[in-house]
Image (cartoon, grey):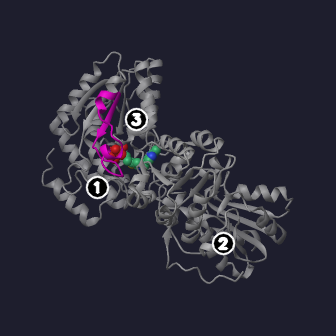
Amino acid sequence: MLDSKLPQRLSPEKLKEISRQCRIDILEMLEKAGSGHPGGSLSAIDIIMTLFFHEMKSNPSEPMWEDRDRFILSKGHGVPALYSVLAEREIIPKAELLTLRKINSRIQGHPDRVLLPVVEASTGSLGQGISIAQGIALGLKLQKKDSKVFCLMGDGETQEGQVWETALSAPKYKLNNLVVFIDNNNGQIDGHVEDVMDLRPLADKWRAFRWAVQEIDGHDFSQIIGALETARKETERPTLIVAKTVKGKGISFMENSIAWHGVSPNKEQLDRALLDLNGGFKS
Amino acid sequence: MSAPSTPSTSKEKATRDSFGEAIRDLGKEFSKIVVLDADLSVSTKSILFAKEFPERFFQMGIAESNMIGTAAGLSFTGLIPFCCSFGAFVAGRYETIRVSVGYSKANVKIIGTHSGLGIGDDGYTQMGLEDINVLRGIPGMILINPSDDATTRAAVRFAVTHEGPVYLRLTRQKLPSLHQITDFQCGRGIILKEGKDLALIGTGSTVIECLKASQTLSKLNPWVIDIHTIKPIDRALIKTLARNCKHIITAEDHNVVGGLGTAVSEVLAEEGWAGKLVRLGVQDTYGESGAPDELYEKYGFSANKITQKVMSLVG
Ligand SMILES: Cc1ncc(C[n+]2csc(CCOP(=O)(O)OP(=O)(O)O)c2C)c(N)n1
């Protein structure tokens, strides 16, 4: 790697390899914690990983480097995915992952920017992260910084009214430095998104709010990379990427299961899950 | 008041479970009850009502403000809406509650589960730690933080029959059975143990901590009080304690700012009490992830910490 600060631009093949390791990290830390959210961590991991290993300027030796690109995890309960990426990118020590959800740990159940500034925003109350991301994008623009802001929301999360207030305001301020992903796994807590509170037509709603909208497969690294390249070319509009994903992706018994939203695997389930991953997880 | 036997932990139940069962049962008796939830019906236990009365249950998605405003509107048509989520998220919609519910005298019942550090691992964002503080300032709002199954059931029935806004603060964690259903009267604290000189006052999940501490402190013969209704506070009972006690300890799984301790201190100050009050609870700080018992210990309101505090005061 040339300059560790520059976007790493790893290839899809390399990304796939690291994503397998991240999935292992996620499951191991959740098993150790005894609680947490595997489903939404596994659906989001490929996107978050691609941001940190392909797209973003970040600096492991100086994590709060002021010219870094920012990533805001608006769906804070998916934070095991973010922690695993921060560890694999060597921004936080990997050993710390196993303190997830334990008393006195920086590795809180939901991101805490005071204890662990590299998470950028304290989230976990859904619907707030996108406004914060917008504020950072606006602040960077005002101060003539060319850093970008990436944000990831759950699809259920977009039922919050605050999300649509940002949907309205970001185009007004021409925040082409803001790229928001929706992790469209179609699951939430009480059921499938279309049953709980239907969002369809999701992409069209954001188009109507004048965002640059793309629809991709959120587990296909080439498509994620392609969408980010397109976003870079936007001169005025903020970008919204609807990423079709699978809740629990990569673990046969967790895939598309609402039941795995908020329970951690026990030791036996962890071993079975690791078999899935070692048996050559196919994306 | 007879001295309590060792608190029985055989019948443990989370007060959210008691709520779910109670509202389901009351649904048969009161056809005007409707229930709303914001994608947490599995956790708040409103799902029990939803299964029994699907046409009277409204799944609002992750949209708490909209849920509360809608509940206000439903109440204006004569229905009795219960809207349910975590306490952190409903109290977070303060301004909607302030105008659409409080100011409007809407007959809306707000259920806030997952109160306090007692939720454990999920950490601060999911913990209702300022809900009493925030909602206590809304005129006409009744706040009830029950400590066990029986008083929760009674409080749910009270909420149904009372005309006006009620906030019920419930736990994720299990709590032992302490009371009979007839012990509950809105606005009246329950004396678990009469004593002298010293009183331990708990609310919700800390009542059992006070009771356990009182056993270790049996030589000092402390009063043990359950203040389930934070608003309106039981003035008469606190005056009785003021007359009898030199030391009063409050314990709450909530920020001490604006919670039980504050409500008690207001009465004591107004009565010109000359004793010493200690407010145990979260000391105007944020919570964190951890196991509930570890957190109660760290933040200083476990039975053990209550005991230590008393010993340092009078020991
Ligand atoms: C304001 C708020 N309301 C409710 C919750 C509880 N909650 C946590 S996760 C979740 C479901 C989220 O669904 P989605 O955004 O689709 O996430 P994913 O399926 O990707 O995990 C809910 C309701 C919350 N964290 N914040």
The answer to whether residue A6 shows anywhere in this view is no
Residue B145 part of the magenta segment: no
**Residue A181: quadrant of the picture:** top left
Q: Nearer the viewer, residue B129 or B300?
A: B129
Q: Residue at x 31, y 53 (%)?
A: A38
Label 2 is placed on what type of residue?
A: Thr
Q: Residue at x 67, y 58 (%)?
A: B230
Q: Is residue A28 left or right of residue B230?
A: left
Residue A192 part of the magenta segment: yes
Residue A6 picture location, percent across and down = 30, 28
Disc 2 is placed on an element classified as: helix
Write down the chain letter for disc 1. Answer: A
Q: Is residue B281 left or right of residue B43?
A: right
Estimate the spatial distance between the alpha carbons at disc 1 and disc 3, rounded to whole Å. 28 Å
Residue B218 picture location, percent across and down = 70, 81
Label 3 is placed on what type of residue?
A: Glu
Circles 3 and 2: CB atoms closer than 8 Å: no
Q: Identify the mark at residue A269; answer none if there is no mark.
A: none
Circles 1 and 3: CB atoms closer than 8 Å: no
Residue B271 picture location, percent across and down = 85, 59
Write down the chain letter for disc 2. Answer: B
Q: Identify the mark at residue A62; answer none if there is no mark.
A: 3
Q: Is mark 1 within 8 Å of ligand 1?
A: no
Q: Identify the mark at residue B307; answer none if there is no mark.
A: 2
Closest to the camera, between mark 1 and mark 3, is 1
The residue at the far top in this view is A235
What residue is shown with label 1?
A27
Which comes sooner in the sequence, label 1 or label 3? 1
**Residue B150: quadrant of the picture:** bottom right
Label 1 is placed on what type of residue?
A: Leu
Write down the chain letter for disc 3. Answer: A
Magenta part of the protein: which range?
Answer: A179-205
